[in-house]
Structure formats: C-alpha cells, structure tokens
Amino acid sequence: MSILNLYFSNDLKTLHDEFIRSALAGDEKRAKEIISLDTSVVNYQDPRSGLSAIMVFAADGNKEMVETISTVDGVELSLEDNSGRDAAMMAFAIGRPDISDAINDALTNKLLEKEELTPEELDEVYQAYALEEGIEIDGQHSTGATHSDNEPASSENVVSLSKFRGGPTNPSF
C-alpha cells in the first residue's frame, strides 16, 4: 500500500508504524515523504521499544535526518525509549557528540522560543548549556567533552540551577 493510500485511509497507526520502519531501514526519502503528509509522526514511539524515528536516526549516526526531524513544528526532542534513553544520549553513546549537540541545540532553541518556560524546561536549558560548556551543576560533574572528569571544577564553573527557579524566563548566558 502506498504512503498516500495509508494517509488518505486515515490509518494513522499504520502510517506511524511505516514511519518507524522507514527509520529502521534508513530510508530517508520515505521518512521525509511521510513527514510531509503528517508531521505528527515525528513524536510516534514504537509501543514495544519506545523508540521514535529521531532516536533511530540518532543511533544510526544520520545527522541529516536528525536535523530534519528536529525542525518539525511540535517535535518532542526529549522523548525517552523504554530504557530511559533519549535521542541525544543515543547519538553520544555511538560516539557522535556532533549529533547529540545538534539535538541539544534544537531543544534549547525550541524552549527559548517559547514566551515562558516552566522551571523544568528552564532546567533543561541550563543543563544543556552546562553540558556543552563543561560546567558542574549542583555539585554534579558534567560529562561534557570539554571538561575532564579528573579536573576539579573551579567555583566560577559551578552553577546551582535552583537559583534560577522563579527567575527570568529568558536566560542570557
């Protein structure tokens, strides 16, 4: 059955499953075609594994598709699979910090585009920034590549996220 037939049959479950299958097969053309028909597919997670297409493409090292999906309006970039891993973690695990950084940058940009951030969203922005800059957060050492695990953090590199709760909604770094 063609993708258009799936779309017009209103069989969204099958369309969503087809989107995941196209990601697993590395079929960029088919994945992009499905996104063009229904952008809601970008947040679909396989019920057995919890994987979304962006997780699959990130774990496969496909930066182009990760960036394509990251720009879709309404995409949830911090979804986790059934093991608690998100797309950025999967990219980092395969040795692709460039893809992980692209996801974190897209997440940060999407959060900052909002007029108001919840405390949890603000925490995500600061955590992504700290990770990128190798800054220690609330006594927990960042795993960013720019900061050695054996190097003690200086006092100017320690940030307490709790001080930002209830603070400004648009941080400036």
Image: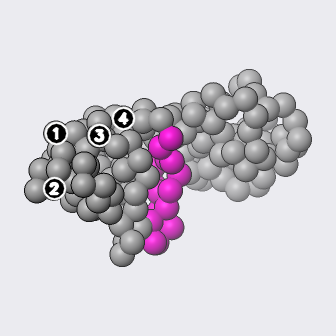
Q: Quick check: 73 left or right of 29?
A: right
Q: Residue at x 45, y 72 (%)?
A: 82
Q: Nearer the viewer, residue 28 or 61?
A: 28
Q: Say what amino acid the circle numbered 3 marks.
A: Leu
Q: CA distance from mark 4 to mark 2?
A: 18 Å
Secondary structure character of the magenta stretch overall: loop
Can residue 147 be seen in the rendering of this structure?
no
Q: Nearer the viewer, residue 1 or 49?
A: 1
Q: Establish if 60 lies above or below 106.
A: below
Q: Which residue is mark 2?
A: 25
Tag nearer the camera, 4 or 3: 3
Q: Say what amino acid the circle numbered 1 marks.
A: Lys
Extreme-front residue of the structure: 9
Helix, strand or loop at mark 2? loop
Q: Which residues are magenta?
A: 74-93
Quarter of the rendering occupied by the C terminus: top right
Identify the mark at residue 67; answer none if there is no mark: 4
Q: Say what amino acid the circle numbered 2 marks.
A: Ala
Helix, strand or loop at mark 1? helix
Q: CA distance from mark 3 to mark 1?
A: 13 Å
Q: Which residue is mark 1?
A: 29
Q: Position of residue 116 (x, y in %)?
A: 76, 34
Q: Quadrant of residue 144?
A: top right
